[in-house]
Amino acid sequence: MNKAVILVGGPSRATRFRPLSMHLPQPLFPVGGQPIIWHQIKALSQVRDLKEIILIGFFEDYIFQPFLSKCYEEFPGLSFKYLREYSQLGTAGGFFHFRDQILRGSPKNIFMLYTDICCSFPLNDLLTQHERHGRLGTIMVTKVDRTSAHLYGCVVVDLETKMAEHYVEKPETYISDMASTGVFVFDQDIFSFMARVMEKRAAEFEHEQARESAYGRYEDTDDTQDVNRLRLEQDILRAMAGDKKLSAFLCTGFWRQIKSAASAVPANALYLQKAAKDSSVTLAKSAPEGPDITGSVYIHPSAQVHPTARIGPNVSIHARAVVGPGVRINDSIVLDNVHIKDNAAVLHAIVGWDSRIGKWGRVEGSKVTGTDDIDEVTHSGVKVNSICILGEDVHVKDEVFIRNSI
């Protein structure tokens, strides 16, 4: 029996995802017609002998209940649970804190996924390699451009043995073009290993505290010195690699982070293209009576799209949206209750809930293309050329052009 844990963070995270995360949590923001976290649950539901998915974060308990209720209906073979951290315990702290509930039923393997990623999720292949090599854990990696490797957690991999020989979080100098994808699978003995790391850190902390106190220099104000906080990358993965207990699995499918609001648009495109490749019935198709559909497009059944509109490629139109005559939408996400009037254009943009775009209005951003693009909206407090974002309840008057704005 196998289990999975998805780390969903909390309301103090995802600040780079604003203003979109001000309306709902980032994991529930829709890309490819479904919440970000749904794509991970869908992939996990296809893993052999996986019985339970646990969400760990520090959102209020009620936030995920409606979503999990729908998951129970859509994935009847799985059980779901949300466990709330009442303080920020670090990227591995919550996982370790709830170890008794995770270990209930004696799972053989435990998946761990970060929620802020978009991926093809070859989880069965990952599990097969993990069981074949028999190490304590396996990290899924992907090749990135050498010039951007410093932005990721990098893994030095022995390509013959698949062993992760070294792990460095965001190295200052180049060490490898293999980057962590935020997807892992561990043997249940991972918690014993984490306990030893915690004990070692506690002993080091106590020794350092005694030494500093002897010189009158100790101040209990540094959050990084909290022995109850446990970081997966710096504390656990690095130690596992050093002890030769970590394997690496290379993901050859698509992958990118969803850190900023701008990254939601290319993630939306990747998931829609995957749905088209899988011949998903959820995608819209052109018909003689219109509208004109190009490429991969998702249109919610309750949305109204005029027959003369031109939609696509890579567009998601959500519930109760109204798209008027002659409207052009390309590479964009249109959220619930949006009204787009006659002959308006929406290009490389996200149009927030309950927004209105007037006749001949134009909302246009700059295209985010490659995985290694810096898909942020602002840099050092300055707006950069990226997608255009309308937050909740924004009204664009007739014949107004909004370009590269939030």
Image (cartoon, rainbow, N blue to C red):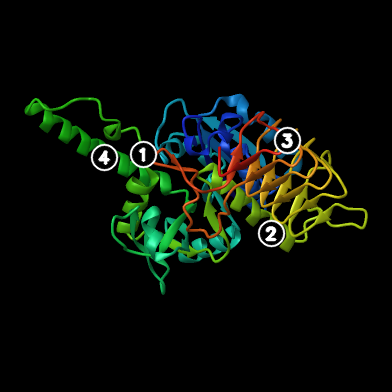
User: What amino acid is at disc 1?
Assistant: Leu
User: What amino acid is at disc 2?
Assistant: Gln
Q: Which element type, helix, strand or loop, lies under badge 4? A: helix
Seen at 60% across and 58% down, the residue is 120
User: What amino acid is at disc 4?
Assistant: Arg
What whole-number distance in Å separates the C-alpha atoms at marks 4 and 2?
A: 45 Å
Tell whether label 1 touches label 3 (CB within 8 Å): no
What whole-number distance in Å separates the C-alpha atoms at marks 3 and 1?
A: 53 Å
Residue of label 3: 398
Residue of label 2: 273
Residue of label 4: 201
When the figure is inspected, residue 211 is found, relative to residue 152, above or below; the finding is above
Q: Which element type, helix, strand or loop, lies under badge 1? A: loop
* Relative image position of residue 307 (x, y in whole percent): 88, 49
First in sequence: mark 4 or mark 2? Answer: 4
Left or right: residue 64 compared with residue 111: right
When the figure is inspected, residue 209 is found, relative to residue 149, above or below; the finding is above
User: What amino acid is at disc 3?
Assistant: Asp
Left or right: residue 28 compared with residue 242: right
Q: Which element type, helix, strand or loop, lies under badge 3? A: loop
Tell whether label 4 touches label 1 (CB within 8 Å): no
